[in-house]
Image (spheres, coloured by chain):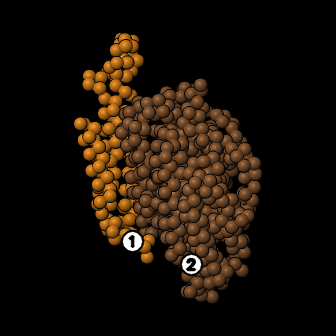
């Protein structure tokens, strides 16, 4: 698998063909989107443990655009394509019921996938900005897909805050170009390392602009304002894609790539990461505790779980990096699953308010069991996957001599358990205050395709702990190598010796 | 000096986006921000008395290297204008739909999500 441009060209081409073809063929959008994302998932699995540099048009590195595949980016590719594949299957029935235009939906979904894959693979800053904007524009349209007043309001909020962040990023890129006359990330890393660039004010200013921009896109706490509204107003599969794929790759991935491989990690940056991570964990979970809207509660938990990832990369030891990347994987399994559960509940009952729901475990056993598994995973109960990654992060924090950070992480985990106990009690195994018996009439289990994607994600949640077998030499070994090697390794990978 | 003015323009756009309550003014703020960055990039490549960066046999390579303007920012600005157009269309479309739903352009009155 050396031709990395397939990850961008295939979804872009299919996204173009869906509106053209499917006016005649009604079944085409469903089938083509699922098949495309499945094919990309297989391709990304084939890239595991491969390391290659693809030169666009065969132009060598500092002049042309390069696509870089190393341990970190192939892990992210697998995660993103996995999430999009399961949500594409799930959407077949969900979109049929709530929305009208399937061909536009799938076309936009594949454009989001194109942008996200491009951001993960590219080794060029301006190229990264283009892919970022591509997936952002598509996701703005998807968040407001229902066109009701609430959807549009959430979409406009999402648009304003993220576009502001995009322009800050663009300004940062322009400043870096003015300073170094290069857009290639490895080339910039080389010049930063050679000239001791982090003492230069222009470089520091550009880096801060990039940091603020990508922190906004990854919804770390001082910049988290858009998350709740956007996730609440989007269709449930789109909330799953946003939290499982878009936020992780557009925000967290680029942030970590910039910090570790371009500018080099230092103690100030590590402190910023660790404390903003802790703030995200605690504030996110506290805001979630008081929520009665199912999807809004999940959205606030998304902030809190991203906090764990940022905390892990702030600690920065190899063990913490394994914990962080494993938590990215786990969060991409259980949080989309929870959003799909919320979508299933809405599909059958038309209700998002926890106080009006109740006793669904008898009527919807698959949704209830899978949501129970996901709740156990997210609140860190052994043997589900969330437990292992949180354990790694906490152990790494203690080993690094920062027990206070570990304590906050534990407190966050306990509060998470409390709020998910609330979901389980009010939705599935008990009932809310304003629950009425007649709401349950006519409620049954969701259609087959929706069920299958929830079941498979739940199985992954229960078994993903096994991926840790082998420790630092196991499946996460290449990721740790790619990140712990710092800028030098990244430069050698692209330019050779 | 001219870079400072460029950055001032960026800040004016940012002020429009963050402090204004009217959706149309927010969109105008975004336009100003985008144009300031485009202007900044073009200025980075600009040279007094520069020539077009086209390989032409009537001009010797040395002169071409020293006197031609930097073509890369121009390509970047073209792409950025295209992206900006797409985003502008989407923003205006959403603004029109919002006006149909709420009957106002004031964002402080759009608070259905809070209830």
Q: Are marks 1 and 2 on the same chain?
A: no
Q: Which chain is orange?
A: B
Q: Colour of chain A?
A: brown
- In front: label 1 or label 2: 2
Q: Residue furthest bottom?
A: A437
In the image shown, does A111 or B3 lie closer to the viewer? B3
Is A264 displayed left or right of B62 in the figure? right
Residue pictured at 51% horizontal, 57% vertical: A277
The image position of residue B98, as x and y in percent, is 38, 65
In the depicted structure, whether residue A49 falls above or below residue A159:
above
The image position of residue A408, as x and y in percent, is 55, 64
In the depicted structure, whether residue A254 falls above or below residue B102:
above
Report the quarter where the C terminus of chain B lies.
Answer: bottom left
Q: Which residue is mark 2?
A: A354
Instruction: Locate residue A349: give its quadrant.
Output: bottom right
Residue pictured at 43% horizontal, 58% vertical: A223
| Residue A16 seen in the current view | no
Residue A388 - label: none
Secondary-structure class at tag 2: helix
Instruction: Locate residue B18: give its quadrant.
Output: bottom left
Subunit bearing disc 2: A
Q: Which residue is mark 1?
A: B111
| Residue A357 seen in the current view | yes
The image position of residue A209, as x and y in percent, is 40, 46
Residue pictured at 51% horizontal, 40% vertical: A264
Bin the neighbour count of mark 1 within 10 Å (Cα to Cα): few under 14, some 14-19, many 20 and up: few
In the image shown, does A216 or A470 lie closer to the viewer? A470
Q: Residue furthest front?
A: A401
**Cα–Cα gap, marks 1 and 2:** 21 Å
Disc 1 + disc 2, Cβ < 8 Å: no
Residue pictured at 39% horizontal, 21% vertical: B54
């Amino acid at each position: 698998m050396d031709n990395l441009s397939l990850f961008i060209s295939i979804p872009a081409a299919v996204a173009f063909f869906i509106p053209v073809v499917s006016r005649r063929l009604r079944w085409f959008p469903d089938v083509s989107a699922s098949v495309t994302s499945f094919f990309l998932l297989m391709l990304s699995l084939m890239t595991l443990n491969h390391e290659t540099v693809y030169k666009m048009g065969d132009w060598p590195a500092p002049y042309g655009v390069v696509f870089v595949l190393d341990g970190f980016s192939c892990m992210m590719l697998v995660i993103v394509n996995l999430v999009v594949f399961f949500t594409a299957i799930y959407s077949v029935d969900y979109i049929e019921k709530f929305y009208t235009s399937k061909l536009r939906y799938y076309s936009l979904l594949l454009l989001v996938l194109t942008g996200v894959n491009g951001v993960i693979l590219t080794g060029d800053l301006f190229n990264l900005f283009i892919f970022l904007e591509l997936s952002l524009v598509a996701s703005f349209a998807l968040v407001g897909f229902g066109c009701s007043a609430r959807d549009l309001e959430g979409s406009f909020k999402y648009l304003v805050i993220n576009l502001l962040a995009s322009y800050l990023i663009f300004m940062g890129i322009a400043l870096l170009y003015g300073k170094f006359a290069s857009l290639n990330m490895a080339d910039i890393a080389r010049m930063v390392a050679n000239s001791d660039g982090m003492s230069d004010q222009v470089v520091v200013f550009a880096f801060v602009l990039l940091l603020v921009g990508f922190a906004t896109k990854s919804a770390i706490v001082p910049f988290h304002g858009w998350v709740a509204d956007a996730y609440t107003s989007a269709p449930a599969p789109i909330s799953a894609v946003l939290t499982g794929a878009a936020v992780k790759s557009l925000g967290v991935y680029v942030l970590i790539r910039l910090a570790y491989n371009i500018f080099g990690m230092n103690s100030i940056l590590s402190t910023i990461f660790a404390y903003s991570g802790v703030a995200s964990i605690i504030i996110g979970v506290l805001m979630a505790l008081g929520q009665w809207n199912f999807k809004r509660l999940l959205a606030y938990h998304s902030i809190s779980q991203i906090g764990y990832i940022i905390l892990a990369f702030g600690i920065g030891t190899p063990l913490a990096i394994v914990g962080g990347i494993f938590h990215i994987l786990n969060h991409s399994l259980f949080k989309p699953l929870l959003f799909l559960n919320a979508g299933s509940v809405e599909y059958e009952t038309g209700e998002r308010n926890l106080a009006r729901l109740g006793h669904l475990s008898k009527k919807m056993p698959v949704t209830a069991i899978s949501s129970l598994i996901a709740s156990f995973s997210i609140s860190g109960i052994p043997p589900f996957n969330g437990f292992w990654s949180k354990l790694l992060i906490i152990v790494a924090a203690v080993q690094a001599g920062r027990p206070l950070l570990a304590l906050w992480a534990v407190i966050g985990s306990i509060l998470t358990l409390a709020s998910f106990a609330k979901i389980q009690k009010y939705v599935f195994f008990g009932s809310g205050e304003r629950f009425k018996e007649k709401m349950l009439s006519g409620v049954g289990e969701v259609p087959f395709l929706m069920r299958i994607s929830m079941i498979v994600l739940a199985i992954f949640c229960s078994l993903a702990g096994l991926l840790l077998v082998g420790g630092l030499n196991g499946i996460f070994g290449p990721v740790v190598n790619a990140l712990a090697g710092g800028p030098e390794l990244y430069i050698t990978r692209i330019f050779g010796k | 000096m001219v870079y400072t003015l460029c950055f001032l323009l960026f800040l004016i756009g940012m002020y429009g986006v963050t402090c204004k309550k009217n959706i149309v003014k927010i969109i105008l703020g975004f336009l100003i921000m985008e144009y300031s960055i485009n202007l900044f990039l073009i200025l980075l490549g600009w040279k007094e008395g520069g020539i077009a960066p086209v390989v032409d046999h009537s001009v010797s390579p040395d002169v071409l290297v020293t006197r031609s303007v930097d073509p890369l920012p121009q390509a970047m600005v073209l792409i950025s204008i295209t992206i900006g157009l797409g985003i502008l269309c989407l923003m205006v479309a959403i603004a029109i739909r919002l006006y149909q739903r709420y009957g106002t352009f004031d964002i402080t009155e759009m608070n259905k999500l809070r209830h």
